[in-house]
Amino acid sequence: MQTSVTPTHCPYCALQCGMNLTPVPDGDGGSVVEVTERADFPVNRGALCGKGRTAPALLSSRVRLTSPLIRRDGELRPAGWDEALDRIAEGLSRTRTEHGPDACGVFGGGGLTNEKAYTLGKFARVALGTSQIDYNGRFCMSSAAAGGIKAFGLDRGLPFPLEDIPRTGCVVLVGSNLAETMPPALRYLTELKENGGTLIVIDPRRTRTAEQADLHLAPRPGTDLALALGLLHLVVAEGRTDEAYIQERTSGWEEARAAAMAHWPEYVERITGVSVPQLRETVRMFCEPESAMVLTARGPEQQSKGTDTVGAWINLCLATGRAGRPFSGYGCLTGQGNGQGGREHGQKADQLPGYRKLDDPAARRHVAEVWGVDPDSLPGPGRSAYELLDAMGTDIRSLLVMASNPVVSAPRAAHVEERLRSLDFLAVADVVLSETAALADVVLPVTQWAEETGTTTNLEGRVLLRKQAITPPEGIRSDLYVMRELAARLGVEKGFPTDPEEVFEELRRASAGGAADYSGITYRRLAEENGVFWPCPAEEPGGPTGVAAGAGAPAGAGAGAGGVHPGTPRLFLDRFATPDGRARFVAVNHRPPAEEPDEEYPVLLTTGRVVSQYQSGAQTRRVDELNAAAPGPFVELHPRLAERLGVVEGEPLAVVSRRGRAVAPARITTAIRADTVFMPFHWPGEGRANTLTNPALDPVSRMPEFKACAVRVERVAGR
Ligand code: SF4
């Protein structure tokens, strides 16, 4: 048993809080780990939320999987590793032979380490030869990624460290409930206010985060784009644009300006429900300080126009000279633990490691050389996550799922569940028997965060080392082992190491020269430096390769210890990562959600999260303390709507959309708009919120519209 204290990071959200783990005897001859404060990690300075504090519970939980399972006579039964791996290889091979490689799908997750995400992309394209790989991060922050690339030429959640937040003059938080999703980050907002800064929160609900705000705007769900356009209109009308900055550092202003000027404040008030005086006050608070930030999260991003919505908020930052200046700019608060790194290294349908584009010939050549394959053998871009799931049983005949639970987390979830059941073959690697794993032909039990070493990249673009602190139980293998063994069975004997550091060394080479350049980062540096911000090319700043020159060096950055590149905490200070170094305005116009309320479905549904559960709840629903704190779903509704329906607190309510019906108890509160109901999405079964959500996709990011769909709310007869 390892006995020393291991400094590491939480397995859950994108804050990746630092924590110390200490193995202690469990009384049964084994060991468990205890979490203690790790004050030296600057992001959370020792603070943890309940999820992080209780994360070790799942390591020793009775409900975790400890043996592979194979379906026999309709039941999942324990089996040996070789037999299980053989069955998966057979299932995938049969599909490949009978229907071609693109009939095999791979579905990854934003919780996978960089090493696993990288290997999964390579496994799909080299070992399986399929183009059909995507991951659940598509449902998370893909619109912000697409918007960032359009405007800045680069997507990194926050282009500045969290520590800059208290040093700005005003933060506009759009569709983020930090107080519930990542509570330790709330201190940045508290410090902002202590320093004299102001906080504006935009959310249809008066959340715990909104309660901290100096100004709370509660727009109708799905209208954040119009809101941003109305604000930009007022910025122009009130003469608050930064003309010198627009001239020097941007392109495309005239078109974006003309689009915004068509969105009169009174028109925007009618669309959003936010009054003109509130719009004016927002503009005043945002424009008067020397510095200001807009931070978006899932609210504006999980829409069928998420990319344009993010673009509109970036336009506001550009018109006022905020982006690429100290303590100012636009950022996205990424959600999943490795949401950032998980989208950089090749498990996304259209990307190769280093954030390279799969349809770029030079990128294909570079990565193919690292992988030792012919560039022409690499498949092209595949379907996005929902499109891949929707094609199951037709074009996609077999699926391998790693670290994802689409039965709960995908939109139109009942349809996705039915599509999963229609597959010829389904294999799932997970730590518990998730709702998706329960449908599989073969289930593989894999190691958890504290039982393995690997890197993640937090919402700041800070690459971190999560260290192994405890030995995994008998019968468990790592995802890297699974991929090596499957690749070998599919005829690819080499190129799939199981040692995470060896994978990372290859990832460094594959990412070199790409937008997300990790080539100057090593495990040794990560252990010594509390993380390193990408881009971090192998050379010092100003060296011959890498994107640091195009991305802007951090203020006052010099070469790091030993003459290596120090990493890049702050992007865009000198120039943006576009060919001409200018940020691009994007001309966008308001459009409504794909589904508007009507007579049959007169209410808007918006979905979200609660503090004690994480994503599909596959892990956190199996932790007693978290389950006790948040045991099930609910329908939040305004007293006026409750009165109209004759509903009392706690009464079961049916929420019905064009896609299905979900039932959960009523929670009546004035903290939500009267035209909107809210449901958290962490639970399966009759209260599954994603049964209702609309898979209408953003045309650029392919993000489904989780945040706004039309429903009716009914009392449940006979209860
Ligand atoms: Fe873990 Fe996120 Fe909670 Fe921090 S805020 S302890 S990273 S779940």
Image (tube, helix red, strand yellow):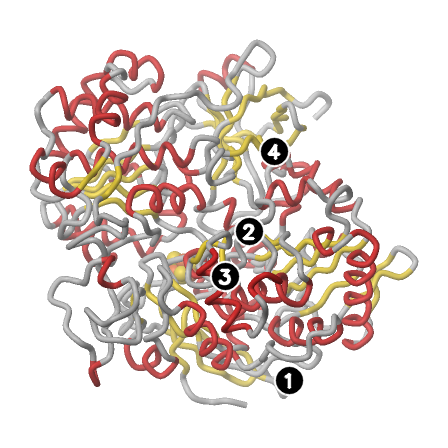
Tell me the SS state at disc 3.
Answer: helix
Mark 2 Cα shell of 10 Å, populated few (<14), some (14-19), many (≥20):
many
Q: What is the distance, in whole Å, between disc 2 and disc 3 at their CAs?
A: 14 Å
| Mark 2 residue's CB less than 8 Å from ligand 1 | no
Q: What is the distance, in whole Å, between disc 4 and disc 2 at their CAs?
A: 35 Å
Q: Disc 4 marks which amino acid?
A: Ala
**In this view, the mark in front (2 or 3):** 3
Q: Circle 3 is placed at which residue position?
A: 364
Looking at marks 3 and 1 on the same chain, the residue that comes earlier in the sequence is marked by 1
Q: Circle 4 is placed at which residue position?
A: 664
Looking at marks 1 and 4 on the same chain, the residue that comes earlier in the sequence is marked by 1
Q: Which mark is residue 28?
A: 1
Name the residue located 70 percent from the left edge and 36 percent from the top edge: 415
Instruction: Identify which residue, 412 or 201, lies in the foreground.
Output: 412
| Mark 1 residue's CB less than 8 Å from ligand 1 | no
Q: Disc 1 marks which amino acid?
A: Asp
Q: Circle 2 is placed at which residue position?
A: 349
Q: Is residue 601 above or below residue 229?
A: above
Q: In which quarter of the image is the N terminus?
A: bottom right
Q: What is the distance, in whole Å, between disc 3 and disc 1 at their CAs?
A: 52 Å
Q: Do the residues labelled 3 and 1 touch (CB within 8 Å)?
A: no
**In this view, the mark in front (3 or 1):** 3
